[in-house]
Amino acid sequence: MSIEPFYLGGDLDTVERELEGGILVKEFSPSSLHAMLKEGRQLQAELCNLPLDERLQVVSMLGEVWQQRMMDGELDPVKKELCAATGYPEKLIDLEFSLVRKVLDANEIRANLDGSLVGGAEALEGYAELREGEGIRHLPVGPSFIISSGNSVIPMLIPTIISLVSGNFTILKPSISNYRAVVEVFSAFQDLRNKSPAAHLMARSLSIGYMGHNSPTLEEALARCDFGVVNFWGGEPARSEIGQKLSGNPHHPRLFVNGPLTGIAIVGGSRADDSAARGLALNMILYEQQLCSSPTLAFYIGSYEDSLRFSYLVRDHLEAIGSLYQVAPSDDALFVRNGAQKVMAFHGSKVLSSSSLKNPWTLAVSRGASNLEAAVESFPSFSLHGRRRFLEMVVLDSADRIAPLVAKLPAMNAFRGVDKVQTVGMALPEDLRNEVLWSLSPSGICRFVPIEDMFMRSASEPYDGMPLAALFTYAVYQRQAPAKEEVG
């Protein structure tokens, strides 16, 4: 197997390296990076002169080509590669591939820009009026360097598209696990670049290449290359290493990290119904709880007896949905899961689980406090990334007990490596929902959404608290007349 860069701007030097498993990788040479970035700054000036509608139309064309290729079965080999690399069932990859078209939709992207930028999307084309005599425009801060994670294709596409549409020359470094899928999304540029000047310019403004952790090319990119912004997706130790290397970069690029986060679910009252149960089960199954938005801990507000009734509804949906998304866990993973179930039962949790090895779900109901820590102490490999289709639901008698527990979550061994909670999926009566919303808002949580679609992002949402277009641009302010205040 070999991996080659995707770049339509011309021929560049590459360096061949061999990774573990005999994978051959051709990386951009350090000198070729500098050459690309030098031209990239010139391309950015040209991109800024393109009408925004033309930029958005090119992205929509990418989505249309992707959709057609998916319907024609051309992407089936890529699906199988992703299944093998991630451990996700093929039906899940089908779902993710079907969402690519939505991500590459002009209206969705414009909504993101309108929500991200002061003055709205029009401020990417010229000065948008703030008030009489004052205006603001947003220009690309790049070239941008996006270092993405490998647990999903969709989250990586969004910053890449926003960066390009905002006028940045963009270099994307995917994970080895999703590299081919990422390249396939943008491979349509090879044909589209001949269809319009905008497509030609945007095709030349994107570069995709893999760089290993110890790659001299990656070292050069971080320590010396002329980037305006670096967007890193991931956790330790890579996060600290990247920050340290960037600190000495003479061009001082801004750094924004989308770090390791997780999700929780909160259910109770009249909203603890079948719809909420299905939503919780669905989000446990999708992406095997590996997204930053996936529920990895749940709280039930109410009586223990009511929580059990709700848990039986969840059980039924886990059986039904999980049977459609079958997996093949290793013997070691099943052994650890079974051991963790016994530990939690010993500490008083009511443990519901599947007997199917292809749908190995577990739901543990605990009174008043979490027993998950005891399971992880007995089985250290049962970490956040080792727990798939496994959820503990802690039953509490009041909502005011949730905030202190959420604050302690990052310090728990069971959530080691997680910075904080990103997403709260809720199914609560309105008064209780408002109470939880206000009590948890100061905790750093970025998203409060319905439990039914925790995994789904609105086009206008910020990413981990940051409006993406603001990350990839800088604001230029202009005032036509002197300020009225007298000086001296």
Image (cartoon, rainbow, N blue to C red):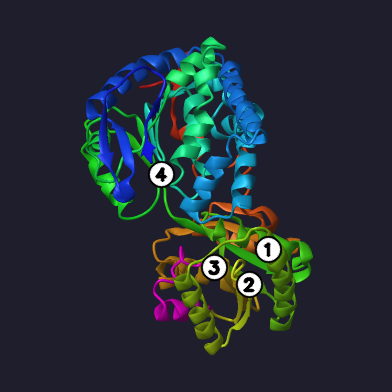
Indicate which label's residue lies in the foreground, 3 or 2.
2
User: Is 309 on the left or on the right of 17, as rendered?
Assistant: right
Q: Which comes before the other along the chain, label 4 or label 2?
A: 4
Read off the magenta span. 370-387
Front disc: 4 or 2: 2
Q: Quadrant of the N terminus?
A: top left
Mark 4 and mark 3 in contact (Cβ < 8 Å)? no
User: In the image, is residue 405 above or below residue 65?
Assistant: below
* Residue located beneath label 4 in the image: 175
Q: How far apart, in angstroms, are the residues tagged by discs 2 and 1?
A: 9 Å
Side of 174 relative to 351 (left or right) = left
Q: Amino acid at mark 1?
A: Ser
Q: Counting residues from the N terminus, which is met first, the one under dot 3 or under dot 4?
A: 4
Q: Please, is residue 27 above or below residue 385 in the view?
A: above
User: Which residue, given by chain and number where applicable, does mark 1 sit on?
Assistant: 323
- Label 4 and label 1: CA atoms lie apart by 29 Å
Which residue is at the front of the view, 291 or 333? 333
Kind of element beneath mark 2? loop
Q: Is residue 271 left or right of residue 362?
A: right
Q: Secondary structure at mark 4?
A: loop
Of the residues shown, which amino acid type is indicated by label 2? Answer: Ser
